[in-house]
Amino acid sequence: MKKAVFKSKGLIGIILGALLIIGCLQITGLKAAGRINPNTPITITAKIAENDQSIFAQEFDGKLQIRLYKIADIGETGKATIEAGFEDIDLSILDQNPSPEDIIDNIVAVAEPIAKDMEDYITIEINREDGESEKTVTMPDGAGIYLYVPQPAADRRYTYTFTSYILYAPTSTYIMTGQGSDQWQYDVEFTIKSEAEQAYGDLAITKTLDTFNKSLGKASFVYKVTATLDNEVVLNNVYSIDFDKAGSKTRIIKDLPASAVVTVEEIYTGASYEAVGNEIVSGLVIKPGDTVTANFENDYNGNLISGGISAENQFTVDENGNIIWTDKDGNPKEQLHMEPAETFR
């Protein structure tokens, strides 16, 4: 069993900043204030700072879970003993005036992969839907060095990741600030530091062609896709689906920002095919990691006019893949970019 003993008042100041942990954390051998009372309950509180302006603090309305792992036990005399399973951690770095990065690299980065496969942990759950900004748990295993690992979270628009770190429980003003009282405080707090990333989802355009007239050759159908997010257009392209027989095809437009609102309009069906049902599907909302579908159906209308995109001279494709869209009188209506027909299933 690997052991590390921290000597009194040879304390290490670890300045991390208010968003990562309250004030500073200083891990020490802790005889300065006398023995730790093993009969005094130790509580740990996870908090979202009141002045936190992060996307997570302002937008997330789900449940955040934080796992607490005891990586070292602290005895009454201040002796630290590594817990079983965490023997690869070397706490001696705490006697070397480490920076927060040193602690993350040498303790957190070693402990977190080990903890990931462990089932022995305490969970703190903050329910943002109920307006909670903090939650407190009583630690049944008493004094120690704890690793806290907030679990990744997601909502309808963002994915959230968090900073894992360590804390000492119990603590003292001297431990947290490097000055002041070294009287033990058995109620310990830390704040959550978050990062938000835009989540993405996919759009599927599914076309069903009921009847195909083989003598007319390939049938092309063109769809204009517009996606808006926060009242800004984030996608405005056209996509084609080609048929050489009756049946269904699906085209996937990947990686649209989650929460974007999508409208899909069938803007070209050829002269010999007509829509069965809607020509516009609107109000589709992109979901993180999921696919929303716009369905269209067409059938042969009895005409004998062959052709793909240029059949009615309403669409002309230039060498860069841009479509010049004209009305029936030949007047330019809009220029759009058409993506190559490459993603089907």
Image: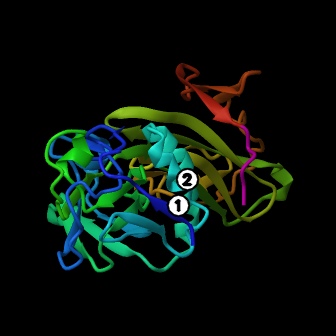
Q: What element carries label 1?
A: helix
Decide which of 232, 79 is in the foreground and name it.
79
Q: Is mark 2 on a helix, strand or loop?
A: helix
Where is residue 340 drawn, in percent x and y?
A: 73, 38
Q: Which amino acid does label 2 sit on?
A: Ala
**Magenta residues, start to end:** 340-345
Where is residue 150 drawn, in percent x and y?
A: 39, 60
Residue 112 image label? 1
Decide which of 80, 60 is in the foreground and name it.
80
Whether residue 257 can be seen here: no
Residue 30 falls in which quadrant of the image?
bottom left
Q: How crowded is mark 2: few (under 14 residues within 10 Å), some or many (20 or more)?
A: some
Does the magenta-highlighted stretch encompass residue 310? no
Q: Residue at x 72, y 33 (%)?
A: 310
Residue 181 image label? none
Is the stretch drawn in magenta largely helix, strand or loop?
Answer: loop
Quarter of the image where the C terminus is located: bottom right
Marks 1/2 in contact by CB < 8 Å: the verdict is yes
Decide which of 160, 263 is in the foreground and name it.
160
* 3D distance between C-alphas at marks 1 and 2: 6 Å
Q: Which amino acid does label 1 sit on?
A: Glu
Q: Residues within 10 Å of mark 1 (few under 14, many from 20)?
A: some
Relative horizontal placement of residue 63, taking residue 337 as reference (left or right): left
Whether 92 is drawn above or below 128: the answer is above
Relative horizontal placement of residue 125, taking residue 67 as reference (left or right): left
Can you identify the residue that label 2 sits on?
109
